Image: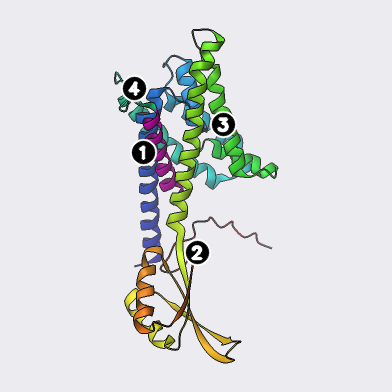
Amino acid sequence: MSPSYNSLMTNTKDYFMIVLGIMLYSLGFCAFILPHHIVIGGLTGVGTLIYFASGGLIPVAVSQYACNIILLLMAFKIVGRSFVLRTVFGATVAAISIGIFETMFMRLDHPLISEMSMSAILGAILCGLGLGVSFIHNGSTGGTDIIAAMVSKVSNVSIGRTMLIVDMLIVASSILLPFDGTLEQRLEVRVPLMVYGWVIIFIYSYVTDTLINTNRQAKQFMIFSKKWSEIADRVNMEAHRGVTVLDGKGWYSKQEIKILMVWCRKIEAVTICRIVKSIDPDAFITQSNVNGVYGKGFDTMRVKMKGLKKV
């Protein structure tokens, strides 16, 4: 198959998975978080604030999308054209899916799960899974990503820290939403909802990071054995993994030795161990986690290369 065909298939798969991830995020938010009047981070949280402040007149999807477009116009010169185009696609899909699910679930008389804690946890997990799937395939839904990207261009504050601070401030501002009652009653009602919002942020952030790291995680083996040639052949033939042969020397024995270096997927690690032990039970093996292996047979490095300036 030609490189252009492979590139087309990869891009098609990426866009499909981005849409799937964003829809999963929208489902978790609209079905399990929004019905309990919980405000979360990001522009989804800003849209939620506007939704409840307007008494439900302005949908979350509308205000979220409008804020995304405004931020992208402000950030265009800072973050670059490719980031803006990718974010516009993600933000558009997010607005459409949130608009659909919001209409479906906010018309119900009661939340799908009446117990707030379980509903919030389930919603946070779905949001984290959706964001993780989207990010793995180079997607972006905008929101605080845009703010963080702008801040990182002009200061030394990390993107993660900026996003966390902005998200927590968005949740905290929910205490200012219209409320009929005394200040004491306002605090009694709003503070628990703020805590739920902060907990949801940490849960979906953790799930997102876990999913991203698990997808990239691989194993590296260093194998020391006198039967290195047979082990290398079996790894090639049965595990379908490449083997790099290194020259080594045992300083205690002063003997030359061959060292096999093998990278494989996490789920293939057991196969490698079985091959080695079936050939040489006395082989010395080290196994370590590798957070990302890029190249043939593994992941594709999803980065945009800047054009080289002509001299």
Asked if labels 2 and 4 touch by Cβ distance under 8 angstroms, the answer is no
- The number of callouts visible is 4
Say if 131 sits above or below 196 in the image: below
> What separation in Å lies between label 4 and label 1 (alpha carbons)?
17 Å
Secondary structure of the magenta portion, mostly? Answer: helix
Give the alpha-carbon distance from disc 1 to disc 2, as whole Å.
31 Å
Nearer-N-terminus badge (1/3): 1
On the image, the x and y values in percent for residue 241 come to: 39, 74
Find disc 2 in the rendering and name its residue: 290
Q: What stretch is highlighted in magenta?
A: 117-140
- Residue assigned mark 1: 23
Q: Is residue 130 magenta?
A: yes
Crowding around mark 3 (Cα neighbors within 10 Å: few <14, some 14 to 19, many 20+) is: some
Q: Please state which of residues 217 and 288 is positioned toward the viewer in this rendering.
A: 288
In the rendering, at what x and y percent does residue 91 appear? Answer: 45, 36
Q: Which of marks 4 and 1 is nearer the N terminus?
A: 1
Q: Name the residue under label 3.
A: 168
Marks 1 and 3 sit apart, C-alpha to C-alpha, by: 24 Å
